Every structure is written in C-alpha cells, then in structure tokens.
Image: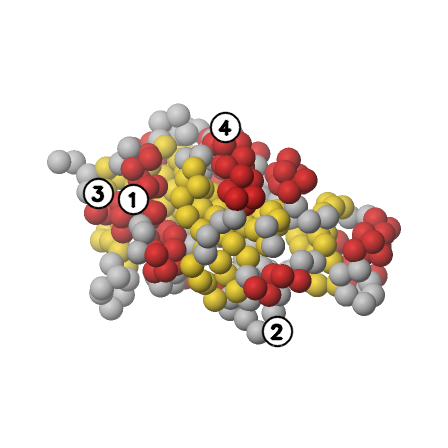
Amino acid sequence: MTSKIVAIQGNHPSELNPKSDSSVFLALEAQSRNCKIFYYEPKDLSIINDKVLAKGYYIEFSYFNKSFFKIISRTTLNLSKCKYLLIRQDPPFNLEYISTTYILDKIKDKVKIVNNPTSIRNVSEKLYSTTFQKYMPDTIFTKDITEIKKFFKKNKKIVIKPIHSYGGNDIHLIEKKINKKMILSFIKKHGHIMCQKFLPKVKFGDKRVFLIDGRICGVISRVPKKGSFLSNMGKGAIPIAAKLTRKEKKISNLIAKDLKKNNIYFSGIDFIDQKLNGDINVTSPTGLKTFYDLTNINLAKNFWKGLGA
C-alpha cells in the first residue's frame, strides 16, 4: 500500500513539547494509519513556476525514543502531492501568517488543509466571537483610550488583550486605576485591542472545549497557578478533567455549527464561569494530548476518521 503524505506546517520540531503538543499527537495517529509525515516551517514555503513548494523533511515521531522525532530525509516537496496538510505554526497572526494562507489557497482544492487557509483569514480568533457576544462577559474592541476609560469606570476591573496574540501573552489585568501611558503604549504596539470585564471565578479554572467537524468532542479545565489569573498551560495552569454545563453545551453547539459552516474543521473555544471568553482558537488548536492523558480518550482518532484517513 502506498503511504499517504501528511504535510505539517509548524514551528521547528525541536521547539515542540511532546508531553503536551497536539501536532505531535496528531502526527503519531497519522503514522499509525500508514501516512508519511512531511514537516516544514512557514519560512520554507514558496510558489515557484506556479507550484506550491516547501523545503522540509520526512520525519518520524515517537514517544518512546530518546528523541521524540527523527528526520528521515530532506527534500523539496510539491505540496499538491500531499493528501492532507495541517497548519500548525504558533501565532501571532501577523502578515507572515496571512501570506502563508494566501500561498496555500492555491492548492486547497487539491489537498485537504486543516484548517482551511481562507477560513483562517476570515475567522479572527477574537473578533469572530462578536457573533456570540450575548454569551460573553461585557467586552469591547477598540483603540480609543476614551472608550477604554469609560469601560473601566463601568466594570471596575478589566482585562486587556491583543486581538492577534496567543497563549496568554501580553494580557494585562487593570484594577484600581487606568495607567494612560501604559494603555497608549499597548495600543501603539498592538493596534485594536480587546477589553473585557474580569471574571474572578477564573481562579477555579476555565474550560477548553474541543470542536471537530461541527461537534463537541471533549473538554478540559485549566486552573491558574497560585497568584495568577491566566488559565493557559503555557503560563503554569494545571489541567484537570471537566464536564460542560447545559448552558455551555448549548453555546458550544451553536459555535460548532457556525464554524463548520465557515469551513473550520478543528477548533478550541474557552469558557470562564459559563461565559464564552472570546478566544476561539482556529489557527493551531491545542490540548488533545492533555485530554488523552486525563481521560484516555484519543481525539486524534476522531480527527483523522472525520477526514477519511
């Protein structure tokens, strides 16, 4: 049987943590289904003679070897020869990220790309949530310092976030008073920002919901470390098993159906205190390995089965 090729566009494998990384987890399941893994970094993606090419390497992953990956051979591959392609590099969602989606648009009718590159551009991870704003804490998107002051006066304690960052980076809790100089500097660096009413129950954890092909497939909770309000595992939060409330299921199903309609196959959404927190992760959703470690349920099987692999 000829192996199918799964291309992964991501950060260099040496930057990945096999104990928690979803890209490695998905690749291992693909290998078990007789797929060959071709791995490349976004910087090595090109259009040459009207072909979408990537300089990279065939690679094998393993949880049991001393090194969790082994480069088999290096080559330049015409990506239209792949059966599947996973866009898995970390944000920020900047112009370089956008450029890769335009390049991959050229082959999206020949290769099954997850997530669809056009859809990644159209579904802004934070701005998309405005469709479901009635399920969120009080939230505004602005770069107007006057509006931010009014929002703070109304809510007393707020969180500000860049629209296109990730992983809990550059998130600030504002209480007591507004530091105008800091806010203006933040806006200058990030442009439009997201301002949200702070939810104190985040100390008990948020909930990350995994959506695959328009369905709720699993959920975990992530409890911030002592003294922190950040529920990202990269910021020291501890994952625990969790269940969704009826309200959270209803909201998750609405979003799952809408994302599927928008050609988003795999995503993660987050709740704090039964409220959607506005982070709808479509660029490089994480948490599948952690979910498996907590529940012994392998959502990578759901992922590849849904694609027909």
> Disc 1 residue type?
Lys
Q: Are marks 2 and 3 in contact (CB under 8 Å)?
A: no
Upstream in sequence: badge 2 or badge 3? 3
Q: Nearer the viewer, residue 98 or 68?
A: 68
Q: Which mark is residue 227?
A: 2
Q: Position of residue 269 (x, y in %)?
A: 52, 46
Residue labelled with disc 4:
261
Residue labelled with disc 3:
33
Q: Residues within 10 Å of mark 1 (few under 14, many from 20)?
A: some
- In the rendered image, the vertical position of residue 237 relative to residue 151, given as above or below: below
Upstream in sequence: badge 2 or badge 1? 2
- Please report the residue visible at 50 percent of the width from the left and 37 percent of the height from the top: 253
Q: Position of residue 99 (x, y in %)?
A: 53, 39
Residue labelled with disc 1:
301
Q: Tell me the SS state at disc 4.
A: helix
Q: Residues within 10 Å of mark 4 (few under 14, many from 20)?
A: few
Q: Report the Cα–Cα distance between label 4 and label 1.
A: 22 Å
Q: Are marks 4 and 1 in contact (CB under 8 Å)?
A: no
